[in-house]
Amino acid sequence: MTSFNKSSSNLNGIPNSTSNSSIASDELNEVTYKTVDKGPKKVNQYVLGEILGEGSYAKVREAIDSNSLKRVAIKIVKKRVMRKIKGAMTALKNEINIMRKLKHKNVIQLIEVIHNNEKERIYIVIEFAGAGSLQQVINSHPNKRLPLSDVWCFFTQLIEGLEYIHNQGVVQRDIKPANLMVTPDRVLKLSDFGVASELNQFSQSDECTHSHGSPAFQSPQIAMGEKQFSGFKLDIWACGVTLYLLVVGQYPFQGETVFGLYDAIARCEYDMPDWIEKDVADLIRMMLTKNENQRATIAQIKATKWFNTTQYEDRPQPNLVDRWRSFSLLPYIAKAVNSMGGGILNNRMSLQPLPNSRVSGVQFNLESKTGRNSIPPLKTGQHGGSATNMTPLGLMMMQNESNDEDYDDDSFDSYQQSRTSSLEGTPGSRKGSMIGMKDDKKKCIVQ
């Protein structure tokens, strides 16, 4: 943001005595520009980072919880725009209510909802999946086909998550790889319940009357215009299309127009390549059955031979993304510390040691051209850890053999080098460096 002050003069050409004294110039009408640092963007205790995705009335940003140092995603909804879309506010409330009741490892968790009436915005704080969507994983592979071991890993988790939400009386209605989020350690999570439907808890029926999902994943009942259909079998059909896409690398049904696509889906005619393993091909056929009454149930899917195979369990599964290189919030954290003199979040910061773990420090130092900025450190000895001094936003807690990747010198050094340029490129920011203990027996849990 740029502001300017313009020196003024009276009619006789003599500068006014009230002109800005900070402008040291003999020339009149000179415009002096000054860069105004707006500071970091924050919502309550969350420091906002880069935009992960953006739609017509909402955007999703990566953020970090300053209390726990946990990475989250925040969906920012503009209420002013939502009001112009018929039924949009009702759908949003429905999505929030559904997410509040879902608690499962294969479902994205809702953390909290923040309403800002002054800005007319709603902030939906959800769990952060660092590897992006399954569609992004597909796009990163040659021919957009995944190895069968990866397909099995993701598909089995999809069915586990789907079984849970169905047991909760929820029909997702828009299952597709773009709505399936993945963590770096390959945990799949169902997300985006914007068009989901919650069934009547007093009814035994799962019938639905309409669907708002993507055309390529719609069932023959939707394509043929049936007024009522099974919501659960609609989700299973979409899982079958997803499985076919993961294995083959293309959609089973295609058309030049939506009408052509729906015609192909209604006829339920698709090619099954002969190189696909028989057990996988049989499972796809079970799910992509035109008659929904004959279509496989979740129980039947889980009973198949390929679903219960153990041939992929012992294969090494490296993380999808490097946790350090995927951490895009460091420049925003540096900006937050700089803008508040290093004392940001001291009052809100809580250091809680993990069970059966040792806590040590990784200190984030800020250096200016004239000297090192002083940041009041926090001591962790009283919390059961070592006596190492830690700065609030530079704190990283280490845990013995936790559920995160090994912390080694090479990954640390490559991370430091990759982030130096982004910090130096921030207007008005100081150079950041990370100095701390390096012990490859410990784990970093900054998520």
Image (spheres, rainbow, N blue to C red):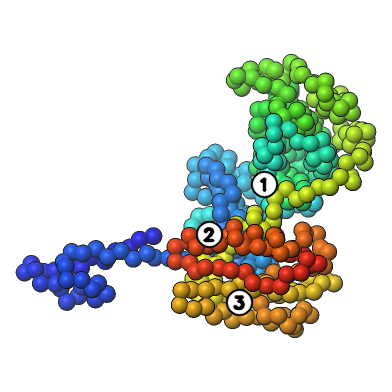
Image position of 153 with respect to 64: above or below: above
Taking the spot 77% from the left edge, 78% from the top edge, the residue there is: 385
Element on which disc 1 rests? loop
Q: Are marks 2 and 1 in contact (CB under 8 Å)?
A: no
Q: Kindly identify the amino acid type of the residue bearing the numbered disc 1.
A: Gly
Relative placement, left or right, of 179 versus 48 is right
Side (left or right) of 100 relative to 43: right
- Crowd around label 3: few <14 · some 14–19 · many ≥20 (10 Å): some
Quadrant location of the N terminus in the rendered image: bottom left
Which of discs 1 and 3 lies nearer the camera? The answer is 1
Measure the alpha-carbon separation of dots 1 and 3.
Answer: 31 Å
Check disc 2 and give the amino acid type.
Ser
Residue sitting at x 23%, y 73% = 24
The percent coordinates of residue 215 (x first, y second) are 65, 28
Q: Quadrant of residue 328?
A: bottom right
Residue picked out by circle 1: 132
> Residue at the spot x=59%, y=69% of the render?
433
The residue that label 3 is drawn on is 346
Label 2, label 3: how many angstroms apart (C-alpha)?
Answer: 27 Å
Q: Quadrant of the C terminus?
A: bottom right
Q: Are marks 2 and 3 in contact (CB under 8 Å)?
A: no
Give the answer, above or below, for where 396 lies relative to 203: below
Residue 322 horizontal/vertical position (percent): 69, 53
Residue on which the image places disc 2? 421
Q: Nearer the viewer, residue 213 or 3?
A: 3
Q: For the residue carrying disc 2, how many other residues have a C-alpha within 10 Å: few (<14), some (14-19), or many (20+)?
A: few
Q: Is residue 227 visible?
A: no
